Image (tube, coloured by chain):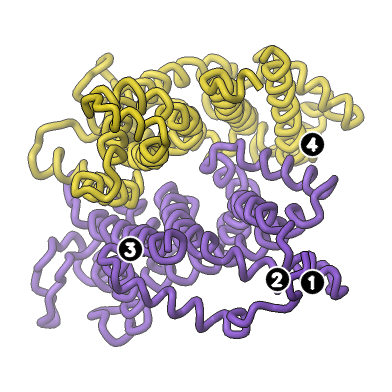
Chain colours: A purple, B yellow
Amino acid sequence: MTEVISKPATRRLPLVGLLSRVLLLRESWVGMIGAALIVFWVLLAFTAPLISPYHPNATLVPYAVPGTAAPDGGTFWLGTDHIGRDILSRVIWGTRTVLVYAPLATLSAYALGIVLGLAAGYYRGWMDEVLSRFSDLVLSFPVLVLYILIIVRFGSSGLNIILAVTFASAPGVMRIVRGLVLDIRDRDYIAAAQMRGESPWYIMFVEILPNVRGPLIVDGCLRLGYVTITIGVLGFLGLGLPPPDPDWGGMINETRSMAMAFPHMALFPCLAISSLVLGLNLLADGLREVLLDA
Amino acid sequence: MARFIVKRLLFMAATMLTVSILLFGLLEISPGSVATKVLGPYTSQEQRDLWLEAHGYFRPLHVRYLDWLGHLVQGEFGESIRFKVPVAEVLWPRLSNTAVLGGLVLVIMVPFSLALGVLAGMKEGSPLDRTISLFSIVTTSVPEFASSVILAALFVFYLGLLPGTSTMASGFSWREMVLPVLVLVLYDFGYVTRMTRASMVEVMTRPYIRTAVLKGLPHRRVIFRHALRNALIAPFTVIMLQINWLLSGVIVVEFFFAYKGFGSLLLEASLNQDLFLIEACTMVSVLVAVGTQTLADIGYVYLNPRIRFS
């Protein structure tokens, strides 16, 4: 206990340290494939107005199969849907929807989960007891039942989807953060900060949080994939974002009854969402090797 | 052990009670909206008041809750607005259909995922391990609705091998079960495989495995006699918890394939604001989820002598 009580030097530049670890990802080809898939979709989202051949809501020629020539001389590369909207354009524009709502919802769940988890793990006692019981309760619901109940009761809108995801996912995040905090709260540098008279929230956010970031980044990546699936499922069940703006889950819902006759309408949004989630899961796998096993 | 079981059962009862309070608060707290949902939007205020009076909705809140809870516990859920029959009459047949679907999924998924997990975990980092791990990431990345569409396009549209709906209109049909079961197995096995693999990897690093290898036991014997017994404790919990996920999965799959099960019933009830049916379905699904969690906890302690005898 006579060790020098000072901040370790490496913590001066926490972001640089993290970045150099993340760059090790190039040694994991699984992680690189995942990152490439994500970069691909992010680029599509940014360049949607430039590269999408038609307006996503324009009704052109209904029931065109992939490769049909369009009246204006272009081609419907992925075909059109039942009211004649170009599927390629809708998939491209739908990227924006999913890449806005899924990260927002995940971030919001993380913000709440981290605060609750830090508080539960650091203060322990009754606060931990109450928060843990509550999270057990939320986690005991079959997830989709919880979403359906919330959306049906409060209506489906972008904000409600974000709130529902936050409510349903924050307890899981809280549980992970709490476990990590319990693991390190008795370390010397925490005691040192307490001796210096730092406030509890300073200790939680400046001393504890940066030291548990590795597992949180990996979990965040997986969770982002899961939230993407959730938003897709809600759209698929007809509980997602209101039409007509393109949303992959909603596109599948609108055309699924024709899936047996015109499978291309639902197929491409399915492939899109699967490849995005696959990218996130592969990236998480790569990050796990780089950040946790090293 | 007995004390632990009693404690877990009490905890389960407390959870169910809290869920019932939340549900009551969410759906039944305002009598006005209950009457609108039951009688429809085009009814007069007097008609609604008469109905509310007749069904005791003007009593104090706590009396109403206790009365409601009493009926719920006895399985009297009220009358379904959509089906115009007592909720229990639609609920139980649908639930047994889903039990058939879920049972088939588990019967196929459990041995398959355990075998793959053990094979992958026997030698960490081997080509077999990498292949199995990658395969399980890929299948877990394709959500159930997407694999439903993809498999239906493949087997129904392009190959014409299987029926695209599973209504079971002309009695039980194995052919109609193939796609729903396949979709659920594909999505769910990856997680169990990964957990089994992790557990196996951990066991293989233990000193008693090294001892067994060093004293010259055949590899097969090391795996089957020494490693498996301990490696399969953790997956048991995972499989039980997987039933919670399966409940979400059946909603999607039953909806897509028009299978007349519990999941599609819950969705139909929710979309049609069929109040009492929603309540019944929610309570049943939470009961199944919490029940399997309790079983998982008890089973874990029972299977793990280090905890059982401490």
Q: Name the subunit of mark 3.
A: A
Dividing the picture into quadrants, the one containing residue B208 is top left
Q: Which mark is residue A222?
A: none
Q: Amino acid at mark 2?
A: Glu
The residues bearing labels 1 and 2 have C-alpha atoms spaced at a distance of 8 Å
First of labels 1, 2 by sequence position = 1
Q: Amino acid at mark 3?
A: Gly
* Location of residue B68 in the rendering, given as x and y in whole percent from the top left corner: 77, 23
Q: Which mark is residue A207?
A: 2
Label 4 belongs to which residue?
B31
Label 1 belongs to which residue?
A193
Q: Amino acid at mark 1?
A: Ala
| Nearest to viewer (mark 2 / mark 4) | 2
Check if mark 2 and mark 4 are on a common chain. Answer: no
Is B266 situated left or right of A79 in this image? right
| Nearest to viewer (mark 1 / mark 2) | 1
Identify the element where label 4 is drawn: helix
